[in-house]
Amino acid sequence: MILHGYWRSGTSYRTRIALALKGLIYQQRGVDLRKGVQKSEAYLALNPQGLVPALEVDGAVLIQSPAILEWLEETYPKPPLLPSAPLARAQVRAMAAVIGCDIHPINNLRIGKVLREEFGADQAAIDAWAGRWIHAGFEALEALVATHGRGWCFGSAPTLADCYLIPQIYSAQRFNVPLDAFPRLLAVDAAAREHSAFIEAHPDNQPDAD
């Protein structure tokens, strides 16, 4: 497997976490979003959407991290990142979607670029924009973890929800978003900082990191 991604991309980060939790061996190819490599002819031939990540596997290319993570779960079911019970699986998917659908898409690098270049936003304004949506989503997640968490977002072992949460906490800290109101989410983050798979996947530990 070859993972094309960017070290600080939340979607690449969540994919690395899942790969590490599954104990899978893969190669990495850095795609520097700041330099526009994702819009190069070579990369667009791989992923016509021009986004990261893209995973080359078995002669195919998978795009969109939710699809990649679901494929990993179906193809490499051990250890499981989704519970066995259908209702519990739906709960984990919903927690992941709070981030994957409602927080991350409006706070990523290309959105920040549009805010800066087309609407004249400075860094403080961009931080405030990101903080608004992160805070709203984290309020919901804090309540959900209070109900379902037993050390992790759902239960006592990492799931897809944690694959999504940890990169979003990393992003929140980059945007200077105060997180004191979310002690349960911070407790999950603290657990991840001690877990080998999350350490391996951390942006600072990637070959293309600054």
Image: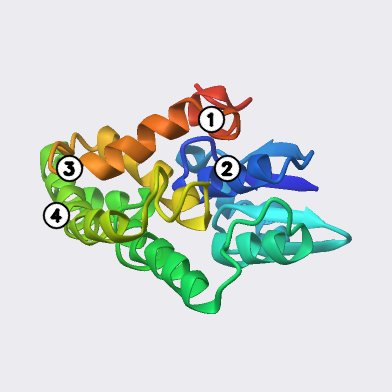
User: Closer to the camera: disc 4 or disc 1?
Assistant: 1
> In the rendered image, which residue does mark 2 sit on?
17
Give the residue number, with chain letter if any, for mark 3. Answer: 127
**95 left or right, relative to 67:** left
Spatial CA distance of label 2 from label 4 is 26 Å
Residue 84's place in the image compared with 141, above or below, is below
The residue that appears at 47% across and 77% down in the rendered structure is 87
Q: What amino acid is at disc 3?
A: Asp
The quadrant holding residue 119 is bottom left
Q: Earlier in the sequence, mark 4 or mark 1?
A: 4
Most distant residue in the bottom direction: 86
Q: Position of residue 166 (x, y in %)?
A: 41, 42
Q: Earlier in the sequence, mark 3 or mark 4?
A: 3
Crowd rating for badge 1 (residues with CA inside 10 Å; few <14, some 14–19, many 20+): few
CA distance separating discs 3 and 1: 29 Å
Query: Looking at the picture, does residue 46 appear above or below residue 175?
Result: below
- Viewer-proximal residue among 159 and 166: 159
Query: At numbered mark 2, what does the secondary structure look like: helix, strand or loop?
Result: helix
In the rendered image, which residue does mark 1 sit on? 195
- Point out the frontmost of discs 1 and 2: 1
